[in-house]
Amino acid sequence: MAKVKDGIMKQTADKFQQPSSVQSESTCIFKNMKVKSFSSSVMFGFFLLFILFSGCNQSFEPLESNNELFFSMYGYLDASADTQWVHITPVREQVDLQNNGKNIRVTIENVNTGHEIVMNDSLFQQGRNFLNFWTDEPLENSQSYRLSAQLESGEESHVTVQTPAELPTPIVAVLTVPGAPPEYYVLVDSSVNLADIQVRYYVRLVATDFEAIRTFTFAYRNEAEEVEEFPGFYTVEIDPDAELNEIERQLLLPPEGEFEVVYRQVFVASSSTEWDEEIETLNDVIYALPQTLNNIENGLGYVIGIDSKYVPYKGCLDQKGNIISCPEEDPFQ
């Protein structure tokens, strides 16, 4: 059986009180993983999301045969991200049709101030051609942004989205009971429009003459609920052992193989009011969007505004031993 090395020191709390206030070879997401809950029982950027779903046999086909829809536009504008990535592709009958993006102008305009950002293009090829447009200019919370894609001939698709107010830093609470394994909970302020809760594992694989880094993502948004034990919070219980077992199951390592958890993070995002409950995770906005959803004028797809936070997969305490949120951190690389 493949061996597992956990390279993480699990930090747990002696007291459990109500809170006071890679380079990636491939990535897979596991939606709504069933673990224990009170009732019954997550750019790197947009560019990496395509790699994520390529490794998991997901497909995306921005195809249409009429002359009224000019672009497919998928993704989100994140007021907390240092770089915005949006997937914009001319609507065409052949997904592998060559297009290097040079004749496409993509902009983000702040509707409130009129400031315009021209996005850079990046052709991504992995069996098919996909155009990712990006900018490292910062966006702001609680602002309206118009994302537009225009051909030299004038055809244009666009969408206007609202970025939400800043997301309060989520809390990872760790309950330690003598004689039992620690229990992990993610708590998110219930005043926000919850878009996603993900646990992200950065894993090193080692076998004979082989070594690689992979990222595994577990999505928990549909497990979140408000419970009496934590008033004012969306709460989800997560199970590290179940996650590790699922990673090992997915890896199918040879007998001499093993994997090491390099790092773990919790990713939480809130959305603006256009969030649709049919969307289970932000990854769906790009690759598994329900066909009934479309908010692009003269185009296809779905773009939303979000605010996000990354925190370490551990519990933090104040000087009095109360559970508090750990300091926010950057996406692990």
Image (cartoon, rainbow, N blue to C red):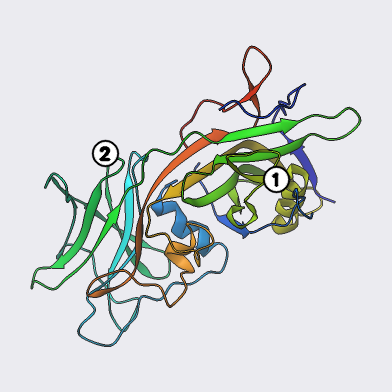
- Name the disc covering residue 131, or none: none
Say which amino acid is labelled 1: Ile
In the figure, is residue 234 to the left or right of 81? right
The residue singled out by tag 1 in the image is: 238
In the image, farthest residue toward the top: 319
Q: Secondary structure at mark 1?
A: strand
Which mark's residue is nearer the viewer, 1 or 2?
Answer: 1
- Residue at 40% across, 53% down: 46
Residue 179 lies, with reference to residue 248, above or below; the image says above
In the rendered structure, which disc, 1 or 2, sits on the residue that comes first in sequence?
2
Nearest to the observer: residue 224 or residue 9: 224
The residue singled out by tag 2 in the image is: 138
x, y percent for residue 178: 89, 27
- Residue at 56% across, 48% down: 197
In the figure, is residue 59 to the left or right of 19? left
Q: Is residue 42 visible?
A: no
Q: Secondary structure at mark 2?
A: loop
x, y percent for residue 311: 54, 34
In the figure, is residue 203 to the left or right of 114? right
In the image, farthest residue toward the bottom: 65
Check contact, mark 1 vs mark 2: CB within 8 A: no
